[in-house]
Every structure is written in C-alpha cells, then in structure tokens.
Image (cartoon, rainbow, N blue to C red):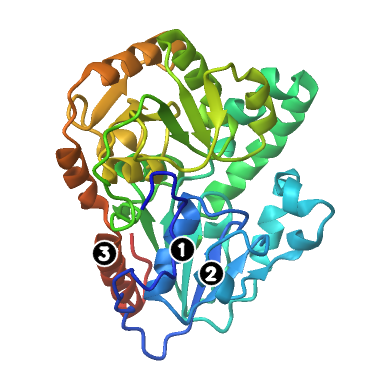
Amino acid sequence: MSSSATAPDATDSSLPHVEPADLRGVRVALVHDWLTGMRGGEKVLDALLELLPDAAVFTLLHVAGAVSPRIEARRPRASFVQYLPAAKRRYRWYIGLFPTAVEQFDLDAFDLVLSTSHCAAKSVVATGRARHLCYCHTPMRYAWDQFDNYFGRQRVGPLRNRVFRLAFSRLARWDAATAGRVDRYVANSNHVAGRIRRYYNRESTVVYPPVDTTFYCPNGSPPGSYFLIVSALVPYKRIDMAMEACRLAGVQLRIAGDGPERARLQALAGPGVEFVGWRYRGARAFLLPGEEDFGIAPVEALACGRPVVGLARGGVTETVSDGATGVLVDEPVAEAYAAGIARAAALPFDAEYIRKQALRFSRRRFHDEMRRLIEDTVRQVGGAAS
C-alpha cells in the first residue's frame, strides 16, 4: 500500500476476526463524548464495538459520515446539543451545557454502561443495578491543567479569559464530584492513571489503546527527506512550535490533520511546510511536539518503521525509547526541538526493530485485555470496584 494511504476502513474484511465479549443477556450502552472525526478516541470506540457488536451508542453530538462505518452502523443517539445553532462546527461553544446533556441520557434499560471519556461522558447516570466501566482518555484537560493552552489571555483576551476561567472552574468541580459514578476506571496510559488518581482520587487499570499494526507496516521503501505531523490542529498540540523548529533545523514539514487552528497555522506556514494526507512511510521521522495522554499516531508511525521525535512528557515516554525508536526532547521550545530533529536525522535507526516495539500496542492485544476487563466487570456484584 502506498505511503500516502489514509486511515484504514475499520470494517475492512482483511482485519482478523474478533471474538466478542461473552455477555449473554447483558444489555450494553457505549457513551462517547462526541463523534466529529476519526481520531484516537474514535479508534478506541470502533475497537470496542468489535467486542460489543450489539451495544447502543450514545454521544453528545454526531456529524453523520465523520466516523467509521462500524460506528455509523450503530446509529448513535445524540443529545440535545446536536440541535443547537452551529453545533456541528462550534460544539465547544456549548461546553457549559454538556453536564446537563450527558445526565439526560436514558440508560435505564442497560445492564452495563461503558463510557469512553475525555470530557463529560464518564459522568452519565446509570441505574443502581448497572455496572459502569469508564475507558478514560484523560480527565478533561481544559478544566484542569491545560486551561491556558486553550483559553489563556494570549489566545482569547483578558475579558473572555476571566469568563472562561469561572466557567471551567465550575466544570472542574462537577467533573470531580461525579467521579464516583464510575465503578471501574481504565486508563489509556500510566500517565493518565496518575491524572485519574490526582483529580478523581481513584485507582485505574492501564490498557493501552489499539493500534492497527496490520495496516500500518513498512513497505520496504527508504525514508524521504520530510518530517511529518498527523494531528488534530488544536492549541495543546503545539504545531506552531514544531513549524518554527523545522524552520530552524532547515527541514521540510508536512502536516496531516484538521481543526480550529488550521487557518492560523496555514497563515504561519513558510515555504517548507505543506498540509497533506497521511504519509507515514515516506517520512524521515514523525514529530510529536505536544504532550499527549497516550498518542496513537506516533505508534502508527513506529509500526511503519519510522522513528518519533517527541516531547519527553506524557504517554510518549511509554511508547518511544530515546535513541532506539526515536528522540525525546526535554524542553518544549523550538530551539530544543530543532536540536532533537537534527539528532533524529543523524541517527541510524533500525526500521525492523522500531516496528517490533510497536507490536506491543496491537489491536489484538487491546481486544484481549478489554474483553477480560469487561467480562470481569459484568461478573461483579455489590459495591463499586476501584
């Protein structure tokens, strides 16, 4: 398959058969924050639907056709947010309404609720007899430790900054107060397990997200000269810093992704920057300039035999080994990151070894670990699990 291939169709018959979880007679609801594109969280949801093929899907908002055929086939049930003005493009405007929206989902008919949450989904209200298992991508970033990356004075101005700070302080209190609605937490990395402990005072089991190491694989071609970013274009990803680092390092950068920062980033882009599609195999290395809770895209690049230059914070420290499968940069500044890019360009990486390390995060491994957790959660009765 060519190096410019896009993400795989999650219902592709070439993928290995997955044995569903043994939940005979158990009615299951899957609750996801929003369905507006096929990013890391949606890839997790898609993989969970292979284990839970009869589950009903609930979400705050669904943009038809924006996610995989498997998710679309479940006909997701959306909240009232779906019908608010301009919600499909500006749904973040309504974040203050998310607590009300998620609490209005009617889950009385279900025996198991599985939320996949990075915002409000974990706070759904399940019946007393139902079990609630939460796959937590992260406690909501903007309400806790990354508020300034989204709504700092330099981004929204002093007046809106004060308004947002008040609103999100209330949202953080609600987020913490509703943490007990979950019977059992699953974290997508040790980094996130620490955040769950810090903000929710709860323990969790770590299950790394699924990476399609069958689709993402080397094709035998040598690496090209450009460096690649595959990312949602949002502030905390620090794409602008990577652009400046590539300018300092004198290398070409290609960016695959979309999001609210796209217009601003395109205006900043110099002659060495292109906005393109997925091209892992042709890249010299993959760039991860921001802090990720796990980061599926870097592992997809590893599965293609390409090294990663990442900021030495968050989930990438669990997936990338400095000097062996990539380069970890200590400081989130353009000069340090440019030095990391130069080091990656000079190191003799072994593509076969890099791919082997990526196989630790395969889709099959995710299915096996989550199947055991789901079945164990359903078997439990009585008090809440950790």
Q: Position of residue 64 (x, y in %)?
A: 67, 64
Q: Nearer the viewer, residue 64 or 124?
A: 64
Residue appearing at x 74%, y 26% in the figure: 162
Q: Position of residue 145 (x, y in %)?
A: 51, 31
Disc 3 versus disc 2: nearer the observer:
2
- Where's the C terminus, which quadrant? bottom left
Residue appearing at x 29%, y 78% in the figure: 19
Q: Amino acid at mark 3?
A: Arg
Residue 200 can be seen in this image = yes
In the displayed structure, 175 sits above or below 291; it is: below
Which label sits on residue 69?
2
Instruction: Evaluate if marks 1 and 3 touch, with contact meaning CB atoms under 8 Å apart.
Output: no
Q: Nearer the viewer, residue 126 or 117?
A: 117
Label 2 crowding class (10 Å Cα cut-off): few <14, some 14-19, many 20+? some
Residue 145 can be seen in this image = no
Residue 279 found in image quarter: top left
Disc 1 versus disc 3: nearer the observer:
1
Residue 265 found in image quarter: top right
Q: Which residue is mark 1?
A: 9
Q: Secondary structure at mark 3?
A: helix
Please tell me which of labels 3 and 2 falls first in the chain: 2
Residue appearing at x 74%, y 48% in the figure: 89
Which label sits on residue 221?
none
- Real-space Cα separation, disc 1 to disc 3, in angstroms: 17 Å
Q: Position of residue 317 (x, y in %)?
A: 28, 33
Label 1 crowding class (10 Å Cα cut-off): few <14, some 14-19, many 20+? some
- Real-space Cα separation, disc 2 to disc 1, in angstroms: 7 Å
Residue appearing at x 57%, y 64% in the figure: 124
Q: Amino acid at mark 2?
A: Pro
The answer to whether 102 appears left or right of 49 in the picture is right
